[in-house]
Image (cartoon, helix red, strand yellow):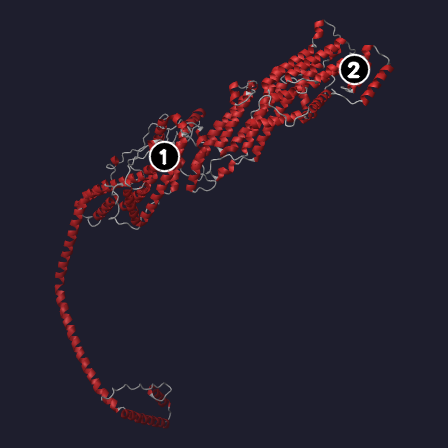
Amino acid sequence: MDPPPPTKPPRGVKYGKDESAGCGFLVNVIKSLGFSETNEERQKEKLKIEQEFKRSDLRLNELVSRHDQQLTQVLPLFSQVAIEITASRERIHAVKENLGACKRLLQCRKDELKKMWTDAVQHKYVLEMLEQIQELRKVPQRVVSYTAKRQYLHASKALTDALNTLNGPLQGVEGLADLRTDLQTRRQQLYHRLHEELVTQVYKNSANEALFAFQRSNSSRLNSSFTRGIGVRRSTDRIEANARVRKALAEMAQGFDLENAEIIEDADLIDPELSMSYFIAIIVECFGMLHKVPDSLESLRVQIQTELLNVVRHTTQQLSAVVAVEGSANAAANGSSNPLLMLLEIIFKQFKAIAKTHSLVLKNYLAVGQKYAVVGPQPYDLTDFWAQAQSVLQLLLTDYLDIQNAASDEGNSTGFAEPTSNINSYFLRRKVASTKRSMFKFDKSSHIASSGGKEHRRNASDVSIDDNLGSQLDGSGKGSTSGILPHERKQHREKLLICTPDQNVITKVYLPLMGYIQEIENFMKCKPGQPCSLHDFVDNYIKETFLSKGHNRNLQLTIESLSKNQDAWRTIISPEEMRALNLNRPLLQSTVMVERRLVETKNLIQDLPCYSEELLKMVCALLKEYRENCQAAYRGIVQPDSEDKRIYSVAWLKDEDISRFLKSLPNWTDLKISSQRTRQTRKLQRGSFEPSEEESPFQVQQRNIREAEMLTSNLGEGGITQREILDDIGVLKELAILQESMEWFSARVSEFANELRRPLVNGLNAISAECTANIAIKDGTIKVMTNLALEFDELANTCLLVLHLEVRVQCFHYLRSKSSARNNSYVGSKDDILEPDRQVQVLTKRLSEMDEAFSATLHPRKTRYVFEGLAHLASRILIQASNYLEHIDQITVQRMCRNSIALQQTLSNITASREVALDQAKHFYELLCMEPDEILNALLERGTQFSEMQLLNALQLSCRACGITDANLLASYQQKLSDILGAKPSKGIVV
């Protein structure tokens, strides 16, 4: 068994500096010897060192002897290892010499190998260039083939790769210059072709789809002229085609593969929306390949207004053809709406569809721009589109509202010169509002300054674009990347309008137009208080043209005509107008004219709710002016002379006590309640009046007696002269017509004020918040209207009360004349005895004339109010006439009875009822024919029918007729009369 291999002995202990062994020990010895002063000390150190050396030698011997076997084994092993290391060194030295020889051999072949490698590479590139040139020669034909099949993506890819090759590896090949120029031209042509396709998709196809959708939803209003001319295809083909398109769009969104794109050969099989998305994605991707993204974006932005004008023109032509085919009669039979409203609705739907397509286009542009890292101007947004759309709508409204003619007429009349400005700069969005004066004048704008006459007018139907786009491609050349394409040219054609221009068209289109404007402001995200330009345009037109120069001007002219025309208060409406207004009595022509202006304003408030306050201000001004004119007319009727002429009935009415008393009577209350009921039914006929609470005959008599007593007590001692009455029947008739007119007009004004409290807009859901705040009519305005209605009603009441009092004043005038009452010598012929007094005859004639005039001008219930109770007053006046008689005789009694009978017959014919109150006057004068004792006995038998003063006067006249002059006897008769009146209640009616 082999002995174990020797192990390495442990390392010796390393002594530190403080120990007596090692280097430290030696250093210490040297130091101690160096510092020793005597030899003895050195000897001591020497002995000490020798002892230590001996001790170390003994230890070493001991260790050698102990490890002798191990040392014997290690030494041979060490010799063997040394031999192997030497052999290895020799082998490595041989390899190194061999490598050096190889290096020297390779260095000799280096130049030859490098030359052969260079030749191989050159041959490879030459072959590739030949292949590329061969492919480039096929590119033009391939592009033509792809373009004919509408495979624009393949064509763009082929052109882009070819041009990259020509401008890259083959840039220095001079022989390819012609091919390079040809491909660049074809790229520009392809770009224009793609731009045409994009414009067609964005505008034409979008507008047509909106038009077809409108036709489907309104098939009853439009005929087959809008029918889409697409043949019926099999449903399976459509499903497969749409599925392929959806798959292609998904692949394109993820980074499409050209080998699988553009797989649809028949575009008619694809749904319109998918077809549009598909082609737009393809076209925009082609722009990215052709490096035309900034140019195409700028061209689209610049063309927005022009293309929208073309859409408007095309739609107007189609709708005009429909209107021409249907005809106005057929359109009315089918319930068609206004053609302009239909046109605006269609155009706005088309604009929204086009805006949606623009949104899709911009989305694709954003993706393509990120994909191809396009550096250039930022793309436009939908705000720019709607700004241009507003410009087009403003041009459209300018035509139909006839703004330019109105502006030019005003300019010619006033000689106002405007500064020249560009129409495009007007329609740009600005933070600072433009001046309102130049809102509607476009005839002096710089872009049409060279046109002469009236042919410079620009409208939606005058502007068009050449449809033959392909014919312009060949002449475009290089560098045609400006904002506007070379084929865009404006051509002035004959203006095409769907209806006659009229400023009043704004009332028909305002509410729908405000809905469109609200949608536009939502699209543009306009802030509150910052409306869009179309909103400003409509607002300024309505305020400065339609209202200030139209409606408000008409109101002002109406006011001026009423103020200057003196015959306005005598002219009444014709029977035809009465039938049209459902009236039974004539009204003043001026009242009806003002009411028509009121109706026009009411209609305008319904049509233009946002301008209700402006309209109501003008109406209030008109009503206030008309109120003053009516009050002046009333004063002119009751006091036409310049001097201070006192009309007794008017003076009575100015007395607050008399006016308050008359208005407190039940007949006045019933009259007003009936008037209110008539305002609600508007069908009250003659003779159908029924009081709200039926009065008993006794109550009617007592009320008439109270009125007669009140008027008699207020009559002065001097009587009423001819100058203090309205002796002209025509004047009374004018007053009656004024009363009817004022009452009718008051009802109309009050009805108008009440309607203002209700919501003004019923069918308008979309309207701006700013406009909505103005729709609610202020309470102050409604209060002003209500107060004006009350003032007109008060004037009507005044006229009626004047007529009521005038009839009674004339009774006082003709029946209480002192000259006739004191003249008791009624001696004459027998024929004269059988006739009533001349004054009574005049009165009965005037009452008949007044009844005839009032029956033709006043409502029956008012005529009844005027004459009701007049018999009681006449009876009281006839009885009081006895106070002026010095003596009584048979002839006088007969004459007074004749007077009473004549008045009773006249009033009975007027009121259609027997006026029993005048029987009391006849009975009174019949008492005068009796002796005093007979009078007293009659009172005892039949009761008292008269007042104590009237009976006392009758007793005195009877005594005087019988020749009784004894004072004691007269006193006894008076005492008996007092006893009878105190003992027995009255019978009958005391007048």
Report the residue marked by disc 2. 954
Q: Quadrant of the N terminus?
A: bottom left
Q: Give the number of callouts.
A: 2
* Image coords of residue 230 (percent x, y): 29, 36
Residue 267 higher or lower than 11, as above or below: above
Residue positioned 84% across, 16% down in the render? 973
> For residue 989, which numbered disc appears in the image?
none
Circle 2 Cα neighbour tier, 10 Å, few/some/many (<14 / 14–19 / ≥20): many
Q: Quadrant of residue 326?
A: top left
Q: Is residue 716 left or right of residue 671?
A: right
In this rendered view, identify the residue nearer to me: 151 or 822.
822
| Residue at the image position 40 percent from the left and 38 percent from the top | 428
Residue 18 in view here: yes
As rendered, which of 932 and 767 lies closer to the eye?
932
Picture coordinates of residue 850, whole percent (x, y)? 63, 16
| Residue placed furthest toward the right | 968
- Horizontal relation, residue 730 to residue 301: left or right: right
How far from the left and from the top, in percent, is residue 389? 38, 37
Q: Report the residue marked by disc 1.
A: 215
Secondary structure at badge 2 equals helix
In this picture, residue 671 sits left or right of residue 892: left
- In which quarter of the view is residue 437 placed? top left
Q: Quadrant of the C terminus?
A: top right
In the image, what residue type sits under mark 1? Answer: Gln
